[in-house]
Image (tube, rainbow, N blue to C red):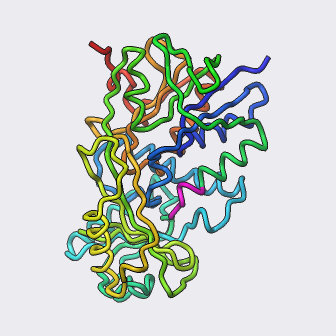
Amino acid sequence: MQKQVTIIGSGIVGAVTAYYLSSDPTLNVTIYDEGIGQATKNSAGIISPWLSKRRNQRWYNLAKSGAALYPEIVADTQMGYSVYQQAGTIVTRENPDDLQALYDLAVARKQQAPQIGQIEKLTAEQVQDRIPLLTNPQPGVFVSGGARVDGDKFAHNLLKYCEKRNLVRHKGKVALGDQGQLLTPHGQQNYDTLILAVGAWLKPLLLPMKIVADVRPQKGQLIELQLPESWGDDVPVLMPEGERDFIPFTRSKLVVGATHENDMGYDLQVSDLVEADLFASGRKLDANLTKDQITQVKVGTRAYTRDFAPFFGPLPDNPHILVASGLGSSGLTTGPMIGKLLAEYVQTGRHDWDDYALSVDHYLSPAE
């Protein structure tokens, strides 16, 4: 008899979890998606964790493992260049000593993460050669393993692929009862395992169960521009010092962003001031940008914890309900590995995740 696995949330974690579970003939997999303010759909899409100076080793283990999963998943599902391109990443530093330190960090980390690929220290002129759009380049470090991903397309294509195997999708808002009952637009639904991959919405979702999640929402906005010139698939992503990320997607789409806005709650309104700030940041890198090239402003809500680390796993008093949240601005990088680990737990009941995250006990507390 098939076991019923239900996933709430179709972002990066939900989609990748469904990908690994939908190949299991012993499971019946269902996913629900409200789709409002989803961080995955509104992310800049940079996959390049190796040069981060964050000292949280668990986060780094998750991030480098998640980055390594993309080529495997993309190849298996035959996604095209419009979704994922491994064109490399350039991180700039103006100070020569800082640039050398960044290069040395990349070389050291390659020992444990060969996916970082080729490493080069570039002059400002060489950076401009790699990204011809730039009119104000800085020297930087290039890593060939860096990539960009359209999170919206990636999750959408992955779920379409899963539907051909063993996945049923539903739209609509769901809620939990005080005992963890799943309440949907079609009434109460039974499950053997429930996976809550709802990002910043985990806190309100768990409150009926008298559980408070240490999750706060953070607003993120970015702008997309359509430029008159076109470029190939090999133009790297730029992570410039002191400015917003600068992501040339395939052909002529440019993304600038995203912001990190605290204390905004679940506000999904576009801010004219933020749009102007993003455009000004882009103009510092490419003085030829014009406002009429902006095609849209995307707004999403990320989930953050007090220590800025993600958490995931079964509820302490209910192993049949799994949660995942707190991915922050690196969700597209850490999300794939979290999804894979959750799927392995569903299939085997085992989890040894000390290398990746603290226990969920650190992020959940009883409601007063």
Quarter of the picture holding the C terminus: top left
Residue at coordinates 47% horizontally, 46% vertically from top-left? Answer: 38
Quarter of the picture holding the N terminus: top right
Front-lying residue, 151 or 310: 151
Front-lying residue, 289 or 73: 289
Residue 243 lies, with reference to residue 185, above or below; the image says: below
Residue 256 lies, with reference to residue 13, above or below; the image says: below
Q: Position of residue 12 (x, y in %)?
A: 53, 45
Task: Locate residue 77 relative to residue 137 in the image: left or right.
Answer: right
What number of labels is visible? 0
Query: Which quarter of the picture shows residue 74?
Result: bottom right
* Magenta stretch: includes residue 28: no
Q: Position of residue 316 (x, y in %)?
A: 43, 15
Q: Position of residue 177 (x, y in %)?
A: 49, 15
Residue at coordinates 31% horizontally, 83% vertically from top-left? Answer: 137
Query: Which quarter of the picture shows residue 32?
Result: top right
Q: Position of residue 354 (x, y in %)?
A: 42, 30
Residue 286 lies, with reference to residue 104, above or below; the image says: below
Q: Which residues are magenta?
A: 148-153
Residue 186 lies, with reference to residue 367, above or below; the image says: below
Residue at coordinates 19% horizontally, 75% vertically from top-left? Answer: 95
Residue at coordinates 28% horizontally, 73% vertically from top-left? Answer: 281
